[in-house]
Image (cartoon, rainbow, N blue to C red):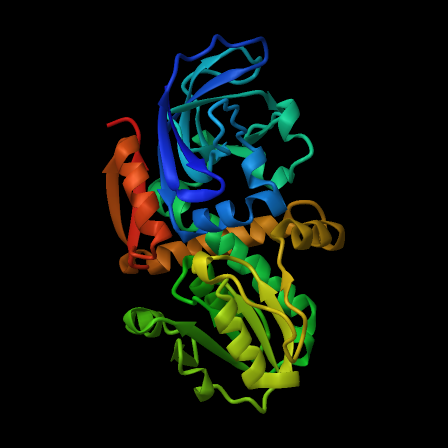
Amino acid sequence: MQELLIDRDNYRNTKIVESESRPLADGEVRVAIDKYGLTANNVSYAVSGDMIGYWKYYPVSSDDGVNWGKVPVWGMADIVESKCDGVEAGERIYGFLPMASEVIMRPGKLKAASFVDVAEHRQPLPELYNGYNRTAGEPALYKTLENERCLLFPLFVTGYVLADFLEDNNYWGAEQVLIGSVSSKTGFGMAAFVNSETDFGGRIIGLTSPGNKAFVESLGDCHQVVTYGNEAEIDPSKKSVYVDMSGNGELRNRLHNHLGENMVRSIGVGATHWEERRGGGDMPGAKPEFFFAPAQIGKRNKDWGPGVLFQKAYAAGAQLAARTSDNLDVEFLNGMEAARDIWIETLDNKVSPKRGIMVSLKG
């Protein structure tokens, strides 16, 4: 088997490892990873990996002095060997996977449509990422959107949950929502859902680079698109919520200083500009906070019943994926070396938002 390891202290330092597959124990399955999507969201997983625990899903043992880790991705895979009653070889699944050719799981909480990896090391981690969809009985739409599912669904679900979080809190009285790195898939997904799934009557303002402005405008979900460095174009007299997909500390500082006490909420989500995440200190307006989607999902599970928010998010995400698929140029890259190279490009913000990068491991 092959795995791509990332240095947790220097994301550009990578290593491809080849090793023998170990035999299965009773209750385990061997999963061959077919393909997965790679987006800026995976960089965010690395940046927040210690805080949220993303590194813990697929831990690495190393004796070479380097703090290696596996960045999780969303992908499609096939069960090729099973010693677990109720799970058969040949099943296709979708979920949270490592950048590797295969992985061993221990399925539990079996349902016709899903199972949970109940491996001991995953028990303290958010169950949202431990669940796997068994695709055989899913709607036909999902089967025709496998690539979009890997690239867009997880990010659109996060965007939906963000929109619900803002709606649930009545936008803290804000008249405008600012979205940093709105060209990111989570960013434009959130903009779309604030428009279509909530009762917000204010303005949606997206912030992006000059090169991505036309792309964002073509989607039609922002009332105003502002390029970085031109934040003065934003009306500072209106109460505002800032949702930061970029992780750019300097941008956050500029917005806080521009809006002053009218920055009523400042929410960090991603880290597309991960090397510019420094910044902070004393700033006017609301204290920045980090958004953790499973917390809002847990709240809605209590409000509405288990799984209802996720079902709504998934359905809305599928519709948005179908609507925006023409704006996504899906590219297939083959093999672990290609995965390593595109990882570096993604770190360097060299991947256009129109490119949908799928890594295939089966050739």
- Name the image quarter holding the N terminus: top left
Q: Quadrant of residue 341?
A: top left
Residue 138: x and y in percent read: 46, 37
- Name the image quarter holding the C terminus: top left
Apparent side of residue 302 relative to residue 239 in the rendered image (left or right) = right
Task: Identify the residue at horizontal 72%, vertical 54% (top origin).
Answer: 299
- Residue 43, placed above or below residue 34: below
Res. 267 in view: yes
- Residue 153, placed above or below residue 211: above
Q: Nearer the viewer, residue 358 or 195?
A: 358
Q: Nearer the viewer, residue 168 or 216?
A: 216
Q: What is the tally of numbered marks visible in this picture?
A: 0
Task: Identify the residue at horizontal 41%, vertical 37% (top origin).
Answer: 75
Q: Quadrant of residue 289?
A: bottom right
Res. 141 in view: no
- Residue 134, placed above or below residue 348: above
Task: Identify the residue at horizontal 31%, vertical 74% (top origin).
Answer: 210
Apparent side of residue 206 relative to residue 176 in the rendered image (left or right) = left
Q: Nearer the viewer, residue 208 or 25?
A: 208
Residue 325: x and y in percent read: 32, 55
Q: Quadrant of residue 2?
A: top left
Residue 250: x and y in percent read: 49, 71
Question: Residue most toward the bottom?
Answer: 237
Residue 93: x and y in percent read: 45, 30
Q: Nearer the viewer, residue 289 or 122?
A: 289
Question: Residue most toward the right?
Answer: 302
- Residue 236, placed above or below residue 129: below
